[in-house]
Image: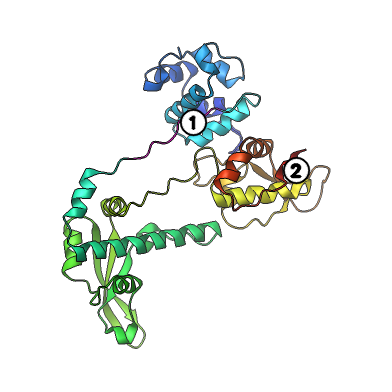
Amino acid sequence: MTGNEPGTETLADLRRVAGISTEEAASVLRRKRGAQGLHLSAEKIRDLERGRHVRGWMWRSPETLGQVARMLAQVYGVPVRVVMDAWHRSRPDDPLPVLPARQARRPSEESMTAWQGLNDRQRTYLTCIFHQDQEAEEEQRQNRYVGARRQPAVEWRRMTLALSVPSDVVGYTRIQERLREAGVHDPGAGSSVAALERRGLIRVYRDRVHLDGLGDVPRTRVEMTRRGRAVTRVALGVSREAGPPAPLLSPWLWKIMVRVARAGVQGVDGSLAGRGPHYLAVGQSPDGRTPSRGFIVLRHPDGVAHGPYRWLLTDSGRRHITDHLDAYRALYPGIDTQGLEDVFD
């Protein structure tokens, strides 16, 4: 370990945590496909880490620097956003590297073949189960935003399809309601479900659950497999949510940053709800391993020696907002950032 608090790492810190020397880092980087023409050496790694000029005309290109940042993330075993933050701390006066654009994945021929092998009823079942799976995923995402208890995926991914009790007694499950809306009026757990399971598109679990007044009744639960999700996404034209491009924040973390920025030198009281500080604050970590962004810190406001701590922006946080404000406005137009420039004047 470097001894630095999570969220304050420099490029040199990331390399030391990875346990490699500048010579070893340069040797590994030279073997990567994107390293042609960079003439990587231990000296250039040290210059990069110390904020010095790196010799070579290719090093002047922000796009080339973005490729270097991505390769460093691979070598050091950290997300590319961590390298981008460390880069900014190590080289605060340099223009930001421009990361390579993400390439859209081509639809899988195997996925389309699997979909075409289903009959209409099986496709309807798979579609309804997929939509319920995505709804459950969104519920978990919202719970995380507000700091609710994180439920293991093995629990919430397994969704109740049917109870072996007359519907006029217990009603329909959410998946059965979707099936009925899609025109399936006998939404049981029979041959269509079995066919999807045989094809590896879903998993089926059968057990018993206690219902008040009815005792233990048979229950059928289903879970989408990764293959099932991939097949359905391709068939329905649903792209997988990729999240914001590195090093930008997700909407909920950006909202926290805007709130802290607007509070200025007074800061926000120490009761920021949810898991936001785990991702943003100096000394925190979202998973116990990956450094936080180091954009906010809990401390006394400047000139105050006593009383409660407040959340304030760090220098890294201020630079991040200044560098990326226009990009955030384009990415999240619904988040009010009017006048945010004035906070830093």
Tell me which label, 2 or 1, sits earlier in the chain: 1
The residue positioned 54% from the left and 27% from the top of the image is: 97
Q: Amino acid at mark 1?
A: Leu
* Residue that mark 2 sits on: 343
User: Which residue is found at the position 70% from the left and 46% from the top?
Assistant: 261
The image position of residue 258, as x and y in percent, is 66, 48
Tell me where the magenta segment starts and ends, as one range.
97-105
Res 196 quadrant in image: bottom left
- The residue that disc 1 covers is 99
Residue 102 lies in the magenta stretch: yes
Q: Position of residue 108 (x, y in %)?
A: 25, 44
Disc 2 residue type (three-letter): Val
Image-based side of 106 in relation to 292, left or right: left
Q: Secondary structure at mark 2?
A: helix
Q: State the residue in front, 143 or 228.
A: 228
Q: Can residue 1 be seen at all in this image of the molecule?
A: no
